[in-house]
Image (cartoon, rainbow, N blue to C red):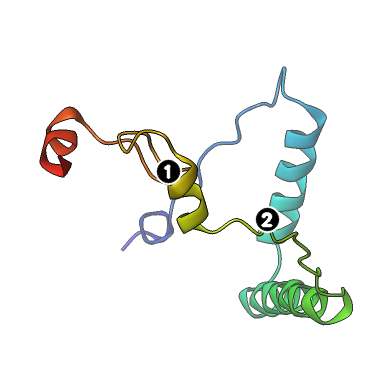
Amino acid sequence: MNRNMTQHKQPENIPLKDVSRFNRWIHHLDEKDKLLRPETRKRKWIISLAVLFLLFVLSFILFPWVKMEYKNLGVTNEKVIQTLPDKNRLLPLEMPVDSFEQRLKK
């Protein structure tokens, strides 16, 4: 077989005109990464992902937990129901229902 046929064709590099500096920087880093040996490239990515995961885990350990503070309103549903003049009125935390359900409740 011909040597050229066994190798994969690399896509041609498209000139990067009118592209942001960030995209050119990423493209340049990608080209440098492709030049590395596969073992070195794999090791680099494993180390990078391990460091990111370690930072993620440490963020839960190092930063204090948020204290949830709330005030008790002191109003129970029985008190709210007694103060309502009309039973068709919605309770504060009740979801509105359609007219068919309203008729079933009566």
Find the distance from the CA under tag 2 to the CA under tag 1. Answer: 15 Å
Residue 102 in the image: state x and y as whole percent. 19, 35
- Residue 61 position, x and y percent, is 82, 82
Which residue is more in the foreground, 31 or 24? Answer: 24
Q: As shown in the figure, which amino acid type bears the numbered disc 1?
A: Leu
> Residue 88 vs residue 93: left or right?
left
Query: For mark 2, does the 10 Å Cα neighbourhood hold few (<14), some (14 to 19), or many (20 or more) residues?
Result: few
Q: Mark 2: which amino acid?
A: Leu
Element type at mark 1: loop
Task: Say what secondary structure mark 2 lies in.
Answer: loop
On residue 91, the disc is 1
Q: Which residue is mark 2?
A: 73
Dot placed on the residue nearer the N-terminal end, 2 or 1: 2
Where 92 falls versus 52 (above or below)? above
Which is more toward the observer, 40 or 104?
104
Q: Residue at x 76, y 66 (%)?
A: 68
Instruction: Give the quadrant of the C terminus.
Output: top left
Instruction: Write down the quadrant of residue 96 in the picture.
Output: top left
